[in-house]
């Protein structure tokens, strides 16, 4: 029996009443924020009344009837007021937050995992990203279960509520292709087909393009076009002509008539079909109001149709519902092409209030104005969607030190491969929970040894034919459900969205994973918004970017990365490091594996003024350049300083004239430079900066702490530069944008010359390029000579 029939007429009526209540509460929330709350200079804060209204029915059906505790939903950004209204009715959102909608610490304009208090599953806002997140969350759920974890919970469906214009975002199609490759299951995308975007009415016939696309990628497609009223009218004499007329009606005209209402519908229908007596009668039997209700009775606003359709899905195939809706349904600007940012006036709101029988002062009362018996309404809410408890998985132990065999000459990228290889050998929980992913650069980012040990993940086992045919090959490419590397196609966006999904597994699946994603450093830019959103929703992962900078030399000018160190500094929720040596990398990786699991709310650490207990994700910028490794064993102090962001590779003496501060792969040039200037400049210091990001963040935080009265607050870099006399100059150098380290001069007022890379595209060997861009030893010496008074630096002449 269809689900709606099982529910029964009374409960359906109660659901219908709740749907209207949801629309009212969302509208009132927006209205309150714009007209009732004190707004600075009458500035309207907005709220997208029309955009959320088109999802009111679908979301009522889902949250009050269809969703099971284990299901998760990415809500279309502008449907946030509807989401919050539903949570308010379910007792999980407060009136206070709704009254502060779009205000300081109030309910968010777009659903936010981190900023909202009412159980948002996925943060949305940048259109397209939340949609793809559900797809990757389904894959992660499969990954977790295939590894034997979380089997005591039922499988959840990952559901996205998708704006039709949202489907213009290419990342959605990149994700669909990946989903097809990976055997996607348990994923529903419900398209809010209101045929309007932000600016205008969309192209005709898009639904058929979508249908073909989704089917091509292996999805079931369900088209929900007409509601029950229209279906009944189609069965009347003349109904088939009415259906044909609607099917052929251009989107623009349909939208315009929705806005104009019953009389306009009548005029157009009679002008076009009036020669047919049966259609004339069908139309004339209805009042303007009834005609308007009939013609706007699309399936996306018809609860029984939606409930039946969603309720009938009894399989786990990915399913796309194309739901016809009306933007602004139930509100005065329904269908108007300019309605995206439209706000109802006070007068319009009063009319809606009257129609809803809501007394002034009772706008927030849950059942105000509803005629259905309260116990019946309450019973529906009681049985509505309760998300599975958000129990977060416990942290996994990480040893303080990670073993690695360091060769005398080695790159940080090779060091990373060696570190993972060592972890891969172990029989430990850490090794089991680690999962790697890469967009077709697994081998070239040095994950090969790890993958050889741990295998690739796939729902179905697939042997490496090269191995079975005994063709010598360095890499075993064997897929199985227990593999621990997820091989993606080249789309970097997909990597970041997958990392976001893997990095939320502890919260979504209650099973912690330790995700590490690798890609080429320049291509971070390709998926930057997805990286930003992953951090915004507090997903936890380690990003390993290699090769980087101009140091990749013969790889080609097109692959050089310049701005990435600044991205690492500026990206909220991402601690970035660029170690020069493999022993530093080992320290950072061990720290990172613990850091991505932290979720404390302690304030800043008094040691480095960083939010150590809060945790976050980590970005490691590595290099393919083999460099001579220092022979040393790191002391605990050393280790701490590497994590805090800098240590003295050579301490400045009391009469120091110059400090060279370097980051990453240019370490040999910095070391060489201080040797070259040793005879002509006194007590030169060499500062190894492992994390400009952490160093800078600690400095900023300590200053703020002092400004708030904590006079003793001193950041790590302030303490280090205390040792440097005021007259000394600092030359900074890295293979990246010079601004990364330029701020060091502001810490204690030293003069600074910042070397780095500002232009890109030149190919050549490392010496060629370092000379060309001015980050070689000679350039460092020249900068030091120009910055500090004293006799000419002799070696400079020799080098020049
Ligand atoms: C990446 C990105 N680009 C642009 C926007 C601005 N924007 C918000 S909604 C929207 C279009 C909305 O159309 P649709 O998805 O059809 O939703 P509707 O408003 O019709 O419900 C745009 C362009 C955004 N939020 N994210
Ligand atoms: Mg739309």
Image (tube, helix red, strand yellow):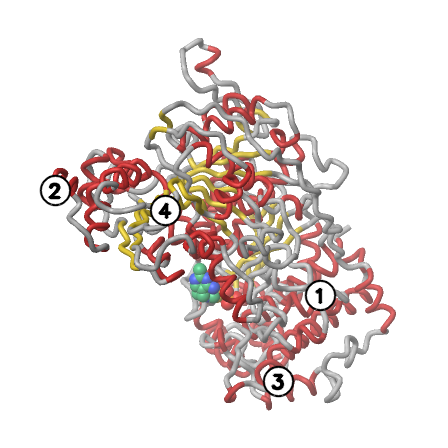
Q: Which mark is residue 37?
A: 3
**Number of the front mark, 2 or 3:** 2
Q: Which mark is residue 652?
A: 4
Q: Is residue 248 visible?
A: no
Residue sticking out furthest to the front: 654
- Quadrant of the drawing holding the C terminus: top left
Estimate the spatial distance between the alpha carbons at disc 1 and disc 3, rounded to whole Å. Answer: 21 Å
Estimate the spatial distance between the alpha carbons at disc 1 and disc 2, rounded to whole Å. Answer: 73 Å
Dot 4 or dot 1, earlier in sequence: 1
Q: Is residue 659 visible?
A: yes
Which residue is label 1 attached to? 87
Residue sticking out furthest to the top: 470
Q: Which of the 4 image quadrants contains residue 354?
A: bottom right
Question: Is residue 51 or residue 521 the one in the foreground?
Answer: 521
Q: Position of residue 670 (x, y in %)?
A: 30, 41
**Number of the front mark, 1 or 3:** 3
Q: Which mark is residue 125?
A: none
Estimate the spatial distance between the alpha carbons at disc 4 and disc 2, rounded to whole Å. Answer: 25 Å
Image position of 576 (left or right of 222): left
Going 75% across and 41% down the picture, which residue do you hit?
153
Question: Is residue 212 or residue 74 the one in the foreground?
Answer: 74
Which residue is label 2 attached to? 797
Near mark 4 (Cα within 10 A), the count class, few <14, some 14-19 or many ≥20, is many
Image position of 44 (left or right of 784): right
């Amino acid at each position: 029996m269809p689900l709606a029939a099982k529910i029964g007429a009374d409960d359906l009526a109660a659901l219908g009443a709740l749907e209207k209540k949801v629309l009212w509460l969302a509208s009132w929330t927006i209205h309150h924020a714009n007209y009732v709350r004190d707004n600075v200079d009458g500035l309207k804060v907005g709220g997208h009344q029309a955009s959320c209204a088109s999802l009111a029915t679908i979301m009522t059906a889902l949250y009050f009837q269809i969703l099971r505790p284990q299901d998760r939903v990415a809500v279309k950004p502008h449907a946030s007021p509807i989401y919050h209204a539903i949570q308010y009715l379910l007792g999980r959102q407060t009136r206070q937050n709704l009254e502060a909608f779009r205000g300081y610490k109030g309910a968010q304009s777009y659903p936010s995992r981190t900023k909202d208090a009412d159980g948002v599953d996925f943060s949305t806002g940048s259109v397209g990203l939340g949609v793809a997140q559900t797809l990757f969350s389904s894959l992660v759920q499969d990954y977790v279960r295939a590894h034997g974890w979380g089997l005591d919970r039922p499988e959840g469906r990952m559901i996205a509520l998708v704006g039709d214009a949202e489907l213009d975002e290419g990342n959605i199609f990149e994700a669909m292709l990946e989903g097809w490759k990976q055997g996607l299951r348990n994923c529903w995308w419900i398209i809010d087909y209101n045929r309007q975007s932000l600016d205008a009415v969309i192209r005709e016939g898009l639904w058929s393009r979508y249908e073909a696309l989704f089917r091509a990628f292996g999805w079931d497609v369900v088209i929900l076009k007409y509601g029950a009223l229209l279906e009944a009218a189609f069965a009347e004499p003349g109904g088939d002509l009415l259906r044909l007329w609607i099917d052929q009606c251009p989107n623009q005209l349909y939208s315009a008539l929705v806005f104009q209402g019953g009389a306009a519908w009548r005029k157009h229908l009679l002008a076009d079909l009036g020669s047919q007596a049966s259609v004339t009668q069908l139309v004339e039997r209805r009042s303007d109001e009834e005609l308007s209700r009939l013609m706007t009775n699309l399936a996306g606003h018809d609860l029984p149709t939606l409930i039946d359709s969603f309720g009938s899905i009894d399989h786990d195939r990915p399913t796309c519902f194309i739901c016809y809706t009306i933007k602004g349904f139930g509100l005065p600007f329904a269908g108007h092409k300019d309605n995206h940012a439209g706000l109802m006036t006070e007068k319009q709101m009063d009319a809606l209030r009257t129609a809803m029988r809501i007394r002034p002062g009772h706008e927030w009362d849950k059942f105000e104005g509803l005629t259905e018996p309260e116990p019946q309404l309450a019973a529906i809410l009681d049985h509505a969607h309760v998300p599975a408890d958000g129990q977060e998985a416990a942290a996994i132990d990480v040893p303080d030190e990670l073993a690695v065999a360091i060769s005398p000459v080695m790159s940080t990228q090779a060091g990373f491969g060696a570190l993972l290889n060592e972890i891969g050998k172990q029989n430990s929980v850490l090794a089991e929970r680690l999962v790697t992913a890469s967009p077709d650069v697994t081998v070239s980012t040095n994950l090969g040894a790890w993958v050889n040990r741990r295998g690739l993940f796939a729902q179905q086992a697939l042997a490496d034919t090269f191995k079975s045919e005994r063709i010598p090959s360095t890499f075993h490419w064997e897929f199985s459900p227990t593999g621990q590397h997820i091989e993606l196609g080249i789309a970097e966006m997909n990597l970041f969205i997958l990392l976001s999904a893997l990095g939320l597994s502890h919260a979504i699946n209650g099973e912690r994973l330790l995700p590490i994603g690798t890609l080429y450093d320049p291509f971070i830019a390709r998926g930057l918004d997805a990286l930003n959103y992953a951090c915004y929703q507090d997903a936890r992962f380690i990003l390993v970017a290699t090769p980087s900078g101009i140091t990749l030399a013969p790889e080609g000018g097109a692959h050089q990365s310049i701005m990435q160190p600044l991205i690492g500094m500026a990206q909220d929720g991402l601690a970035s490091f660029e170690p020069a040596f493999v022993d530093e990398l080992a320290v950072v990786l061990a720290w990172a594996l613990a850091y991505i699991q932290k979720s404390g709310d302690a304030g800043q650490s008094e040691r480095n003024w960083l939010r150590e207990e809060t945790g976050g994700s980590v970005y490691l910028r590595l290099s393919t350049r083999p460099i001579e490794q220092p022979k040393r064993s790191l002391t605990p102090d050393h280790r701490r300083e590497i994590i805090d962001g800098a240590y003295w590779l050579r301490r400045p003496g009391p009469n120091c004239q110059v400090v060279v501060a370097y980051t990453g792969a240019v370490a040999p040039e910095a070391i060489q430079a201080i040797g070259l200037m040793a005879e002509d400049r006194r007590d030169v210091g060499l500062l190894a900066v492992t994390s400009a990001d952490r160093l800078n963040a600690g400095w900023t935080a300590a200053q703020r702490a002092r400004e708030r009265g904590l006079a003793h607050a001193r950041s790590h870099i302030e303490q280090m530069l205390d040792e440097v006399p005021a007259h000394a100059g600092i030359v900074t150098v890295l293979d990246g944008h010079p601004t990364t380290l330029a701020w060091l001069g502001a810490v204690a007022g030293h003069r600074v010359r910042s070397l780095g890379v500002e232009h890109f595209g030149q190919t050549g060997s490392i010496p060629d390029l370092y000379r060309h861009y001015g980050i070689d030893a000679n350039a460092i010496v020249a900068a030091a000579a120009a910055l500090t008074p004293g006799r000419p630096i002799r070696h400079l002449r020799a080098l020049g």
